[in-house]
Image (cartoon, helix red, strand yellow):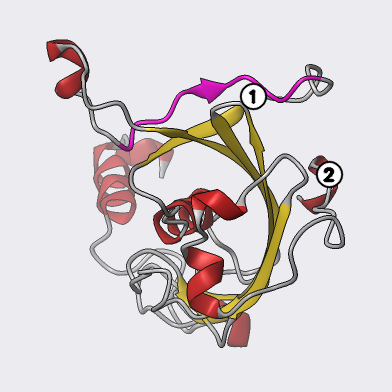
Amino acid sequence: MIGDFDAPRWGSGTLSRMTMDVLTPKIVDITAEGLSLSGDLTGEELGLTDADVSIRGTLAVGLELRAIERTIYVTGVVEGTAVRQCVRCLKDFDDPLAFSLRVAYEREVKATSAVAKRDDPRKRKPAAPPEGEAEEQNDDLYYFTGDHLELAPMLREQLILASPMHPLCSEECRGLCTRCGKDLNEGPCRCGEEPTGSPFQVLRTMKEKLKDPGER
């Protein structure tokens, strides 16, 4: 949640830029003093599909980037509304979305070992935090090439990681009847407790037949 990390210092760096600059800032503009970026981004601009996360409207994204030696540290907050499907009643519902992110970027080195070449270039590993922040958790590490950062893939991945595995429209959701499929949130269905021909009813009938006539 937002309180888990320090919020970006919006006044410490350059003023907010246009959408494309938010997603592709120039490396030369990122200094130790910090570069602050913010904007309203759509799911399409982040490369999201409905299979990833469905976004209603736009996402408010605020980021601060700092260059410490050869590493670029990115902190920020993302807020918006996700459209999810309840795992119990299967209905779509609006889910308020708000989380903090803390990642790091390093330039991808081309001269790598044969083992490293077989690894996924987007595979992340913990990055040491800047000096003075040793007690905070390690950052997720990404890689960049060229003279710009490509932030869209990182934001897309962070949005997916922030999504619940079993979304519920509410904790009290009663789900669907397993027999007729009726939404039990709208009231009880007319299904009997044990439909005719159920294994439990057949077993009870067999037990009745096996009883001693004198016990009946």
Q: Which residue is mark 1?
A: 138
The residues tagged by marks 1 and 2 sit, at their Cα atoms, a distance apart of 14 Å
Residue 173: give x, y in percent of width and height. 63, 69
Residue 137 is left or right of residue 11, and the answer is left
Label 1 secondary element: loop
Residue 10 position within the rendered picture, expressed as x and y whole percent measured from the top left: 83, 61
Q: Secondary structure at mark 2?
A: loop
Q: Residue at x 54, y 28 (%)?
A: 70
Task: Return the disc, 1 or 2, that comes first in the chain's sequence.
Answer: 2
Say which residue label 2 marks.
6
Residue positioned 76% across, 50% down in the render: 1
Residue 143's place in the image compared with 13, above or below, is above
Give the crowd class for mark 1: few <14, some 14-19, many >=20 residues within 10 Å.
Answer: some
Boundaries of the magenta span: 122-131
Q: Residue at x 67, y 44 (%)?
A: 31
- Check the picture and name the quadrant holding the C terminus: top left
| Residue 89 visible in image | no
Task: Kindly check if marks 1 and 2 are in contact, taking CB atoms under 8 A apart as contact.
Answer: no
In percent of width and height, residue 210 lies at: 25, 37
Q: Position of residue 35 (x, y in %)?
A: 70, 55
Q: The disc labelled 2 sits on which kind of residue?
A: Asp
Q: Residue furthest front?
A: 28
The residue nearer to you, when weighing 74 against 163, is 74
Q: Is residue 163 magenta?
A: no
Task: Please name the amino acid that badge 1 sits on.
Answer: Asn
